[in-house]
Amino acid sequence: MKPIIHELGARVRDALAAIGVDADPLLARSGDPKFGDYQSNAAMGLAKKLGRKPRDLAQAIVDAITVDDLCEPPTIAGPGFINFRLSPSFLAARLAAIPPAPEDGSDRLGLGSAENPDVVVVDLSSPNLAKEMHIGHLRSTVIGDCVARVLEFQGHTVHRENHVGDWGTQFGMLVAYLKRTEPEVVENPDTLEIGDLESFYVEAKALFDADEDFKTESRETVVALQSGDPVIRRIWKAFCDESLRHCHAIYDRLGVRLIDRGESFYNDLMDEVIIRLEKARDSGDHDYVRDSDGALCIFPGGFTTRDGDPLPLLVRKSDGGFNYATSDLATILHRVEQLKATRIIYVVGITQKQHFDMLFAAARKVGWVDQEMPLEHLAFGNVLASDGRPFKTREGGVVKLKDVLEQAVARARGVIEKDSDLSADQADNVAETVGLAAVKYFDLCHSLKSDYKFNLDHMLAMEGNTAPYMLYAYARIRSIQRKAKVDHVQLTADMQITIEHPAEIELATKLLQFAEVIETVGRDLYPNVLTDYLFELAKSFSRFYDKKIGVRVIDAPEDLRLSRLRICDLTARVLKTGLRLLGIETIERM
Ligand code: ARG
């Protein structure tokens, strides 16, 4: 099943062809349902070119078009907009054609898969292993997971790459400190346990700052690490493994899958990056690769220093060391050449915008990435404290992500306890789901680039665009179905659907927009488009089920009753599928 907008677009295109024009139908969803569901703006631009009056051209298109199986007769408005309103019978037939949900939870709601699937790399989460994950990693993890889920749902192959920071001078210090404080780790690297990575780092850093001998030892350790000293490597690996265990405790809890491929994975490839760039530099016909103050640089063009001089991407420092750009150029080589990526998405905070702008420009300049291949920095804003200040502990330290999640779950538990007949175990489970869902949903429903204030009261509110509201909306439909005593699995595809009441038309129209929303999110990567849609859908359902403005469902006449119960079921399925794509599990009873 295709999104309706494409089906309708093809009809407009055919009509244009019938009057001798080959042009884009310029079809979009109407801003205001008063005018219909879709609108074509083709006539205005074309009229100028063809030397005709826009309204006449619009009329010619309307005369030539065949849409009576989809829409009411199209109308012309203003200077020549063509408005389309889907017909109730089409809405009913479309909904009725959605196949039943498979038992295994992989509901696709009858949507087809991408015709030309991409191989997409999503670079997500990517914390620094020297420390504990903090609140900032919530965003790169949750947004990245959502984007990956949507792309997988569309049928693309997705590599979820966790580009953890596991290399660099900090690790010399940490390994040296570990050697001092836990000498037995050399013999038993697998038994290493560090309860609190954050304070471990702080202690190591304090010693580093205070003790010259330790500083020297740390520096020597970095050299030993880089030259592959087996003992140092083993301690380093033990540290990274332990830090990754901390990360994965969080990923498991959040239901996020990914592949750990840290900076160290790219060590050999970084040499390859340099070899290729030196070759380009020495060949003489790539003047954008050259040395500058002893450093090897790419000058992608279009970037300037404050003084207006061309700004290069520094790939090898004058001391011979590599940097962040070197490893990111290596990620590009790996992803393009080995993973065969056709689209790469970096889910990283907006503060790294310049780095990615330059990286992408440089990679294209040296020809490692085709001009057309999408390289996207999916940049997001900061999470602030609820008073709008930087998110810090009372002592001014970073707030650990695991503590934040713990708090949200505890708060959710408090909300449930008041008036529930759930057992303690059930309540714990519900609190876990609701608490984590609240944090995720709140993050995803904000527009990506702006900062937002972390506020447990807002995210756990039962009213408004929140996870508890959405989860409740879902559970409520399931409870209606239980009350009606129909098993939703038995509401089979061959059952008639009738759409007649305005609230029914509104809900059916909303339900059928799901395909377009998924397409938009897969293209633009804005999760809040999906949360907004689901919120609208839940509100449409409330109106549909409302005693005054909606329809009777459980006590409706028998044929309408089954049709409406089927609409309830489809609404629950779209909510469940949409929430699943946000990384949120639904609950049947709340
Ligand atoms: N580890 C980096 C940081 O904490 C983020 C890495 C993002 N991914 C990348 N390929 N640069 O800032």
Image (tube, rainbow, N blue to C red):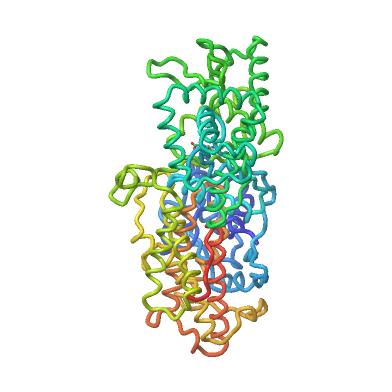
Residue 476 visible within the image: yes
Answer above or below: position of 30 versus 491: above
Residue 255 screen position, x and y as percent: 56, 57
| Residue 223 horizontal side relative to residue 435, left or right | right
Residue at 52% x, 27% y: name it: 169
Residue at 43% x, 14% y: name it: 309
Q: How many marks?
A: 0
Q: Say which of 314 and 564 sits in front.
A: 314
Residue 179 screen position, x and y as percent: 55, 33
Residue 503 screen position, x and y as percent: 45, 75
Residue at 40% x, 54% y: name it: 78
Q: Where is the N terminus found, in terms of image quarters?
A: bottom right
Q: Say which of 170 and 405 sits in front.
A: 170
Residue farthest toward the front in the current orientation of the protein:
184
Residue 520 visible within the image: no
Residue 387 screen position, x and y as percent: 28, 50
